[in-house]
Image: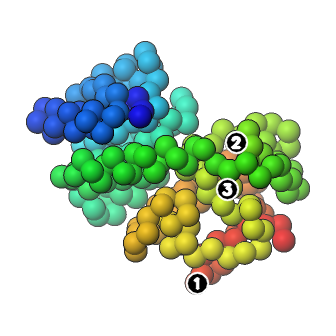
Amino acid sequence: MAAILLIEDDPLVRRGLQLALSRHGHDVRTADTGEDGLREFRSAPPGLVVLDLMLPGIDGFEVCRRIRAEGEVPVIMLTARGDDFDVVGGLAAGADDYVVKPAQPTVLDARIRAVLRRSTGTSDGVRVHRDLRVDSTSLTVSLRGEPVMLTPTELRLLLTLSRAPGRVFSRQQLLEEVWELDYLGDSRLVDNCVQRLRVKIEDGSGAPVYVQTVRGFGYRFGPV
């Protein structure tokens, strides 16, 4: 299914997840430290990284930041806690999704497949909004003629919003359409992804043009 790099320092967890994900059809390489994980990532870039946040040496937050600085490979973080410190910190570092440990292999596999599907998009042509060009056939985005590098999740969010300019999407609707979470999911996934997307396509003036907040409701795509 996918070439996965699993970075996890606990040998029992690492081996268990490697075997389980392999049974689900994934090709899994492993590393037990952040330093080794980055070396593996650079030597043979995977299709997706599963990353434990609490690593010896370089921790998972810094590993995620370095991976994100070097490319758009999707990252799912493993966190021992579901609290704000781990979740918000990991999402702010550039992670696409998270799973709270102990991670059930079937749940992790489902989240992996959902993240990978976000890179497929839909084939409904090119849309131009002021200086922003969104091509959902080639899955490319450009701003003032310059390419914009987006992660699969950021791209899927932009595609979803830009297909219906002016329509207000609640956070739950975006969780269902972008993250494929059909239950009451974590709205922090949406908010952090919106923040990262704005950094890449907005002008930094503090008044977003393309991804607008509708207070009390959610987000919409402009200009309308």
Q: Is residue 106 left or right of residue 46?
A: left
Which numbered dot is residue 25?
none
For disc 3, the marked residue is: 158
> Label 1's element?
loop
> Label 3's element?
helix
Q: Is residue 21 left or right of residue 201?
A: left
Q: Earlier in the sequence, mark 2 or mark 1?
A: 2
Q: Quick one: quadrant of the N terminus?
A: top left
Residue farthest left in this picture: 12
Give the alpha-carbon distance from disc 2 to disc 1, as whole Å: 31 Å
Q: Is residue 120 above or below residue 166?
A: above
Q: Earlier in the sequence, mark 2 or mark 3?
A: 2
Which numbered dot is residue 216?
1
The percent position of residue 101, horizontal first and vertical second, equals 21, 52
| Foreground disc of the pair 2, 3 | 2
Q: Quick one: quadrant of the C terminus?
A: bottom right
For disc 2, the marked residue is: 139
Mark 1 neighbour density, 10 Å: few (under 14) some (14–19) many (20 or more) = few
Q: Residue at x 60, y 44 (%)?
A: 120
Residue farthest bottom in this picture: 216
**Amino acid type, mark 2:** Leu
**Whether residue 24 can be seen here:** yes
The percent position of residue 215, horizontal first and vertical second, equals 62, 81
**Amino acid type, mark 1:** Gly
Q: Is residue 24 left or right of residue 179?
A: left
Give the alpha-carbon distance from disc 2 to disc 3, as whole Å: 11 Å
Out of 183 and 145, give the one closest to the viewer. 183
Q: Earlier in the sequence, mark 1 or mark 3?
A: 3
Q: Residue at x 31, y 25 (%)?
A: 29
The percent position of residue 179, horizontal first and vertical second, equals 49, 59
The percent position of residue 9, horizontal first and vertical second, equals 19, 33
